Amino acid sequence: MKGNRLFEIIYILLDKKNVTAKELAEHFEVSQRTIYRDIEDLSQSGVPIYMTKGKGGGISLLSDFILNKAILSQEEKKEILAAMQGLNAVNKSEFNGVLSKLSSFLGGDNENWIEVDFSNWDKNNTLGEKFTTIKNSIINKNLISFEYFNSNGKLLERIVEPLKLVFKGQGWYLYAYCREREDNRFFKLTRMSNINIILENFNRTVPNKIFSEEDTGYYNELIHLKLRIDKKLAFRIYDEFHNYSLDDNGDFIVNLDFPSGDWLFGYLMSFGEYIEVLEPLNIRDEIKKKLMYALKKY
């Protein structure tokens, strides 16, 4: 659409400072005549855009030009502010000022229809500090070192090339290349401590997209579980599962695929007396052994 093209022309000029009509025509796959008409339309709209001839000439913006909010539609303004409100949840001190300036710039009586808070109920916002440190290391391509508690409860020391911050499954993770394992790994931010930026750069490319609909490659192995969970824990069913049905007693039958590992037993046992593992039998037997071992302590 023409409106989108005009908007993108401005951003190209803000980025590259000077572009020829031929380059713009090739970029948008339109004629140079169309580009000249676009430039005229922008000029008539008050955008300080001009053309120069000769060697080194082309289309430029005045150096002090600031993008006018009128170029954005009302819906686009709302989407930008909503996205910033989501980022504000990660570290309020860092994004509050940006959000305030954007809100004033975009004008608006923007409805605060969304509020996101990733901090725990105890209000100890160490997650925000970790997020900021890791974010800076990703942007500057610096190595980081930290201590990490893995799913087996072991304290590890790691040096990694941080590539991406990921929010998945109700938690924040760092996706990074681990120098120890020589492979990409996920690290849960809540299990990371003593994070330090190392003044050494890396050149590894940041992936555009880590997950796909079919991808489960970041798991070691998936195990299919069939569980019966007492209706007294209905609130956890609604919070944590999507594929469930009711039996004749009104209890929940849950079918799901979960990553393997010792952490799985701790998770299942967190349901206490209100869960029964129906399948597979090896997981059911292992749960039984762990419960018998725990019973000996009492």
Image (spheres, grey):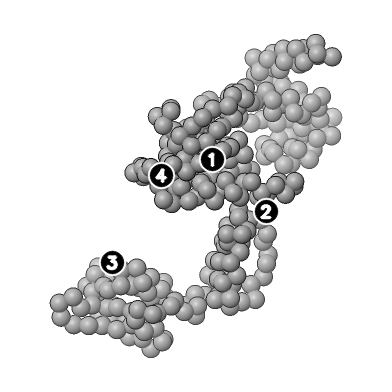
Q: Residue at x 26, y 72 (%)?
A: 19
The quarter of the displayed image where residue 193 is located? top right
What residue does disc 3 label?
27
What residue does disc 4 label?
199
What residue does disc 2 label?
117
Mark 2 element type:
loop
Q: Amino acid at mark 3?
A: His
Q: Is residue 148 shown left or right of residue 12?
A: right
Q: Residue at x 67, y 23 (%)?
A: 265
- Residue 146 in the image, given as x and y percentages of width and height: 52, 36
Mark 1 element type:
strand
Marks 4 and 1, Cα distance to the nearest angstrom?
13 Å
Marks 2 and 1, Cα distance to the nearest angstrom?
22 Å
Report the front residue among 25 and 120. 120
Query: Which quadrant of the rendered structure holds the N terminus?
Result: bottom left
Determine if residue 215 is in view. Answer: no
Marks 3 and 2, Cα distance to the nearest angstrom?
41 Å
Q: Amino acid at mark 2?
A: Asp
Report the front residue among 34 and 62. 62
Report the front residue among 278 and 199. 199
Q: Above or below — where is 147 with respect to 34? A: above
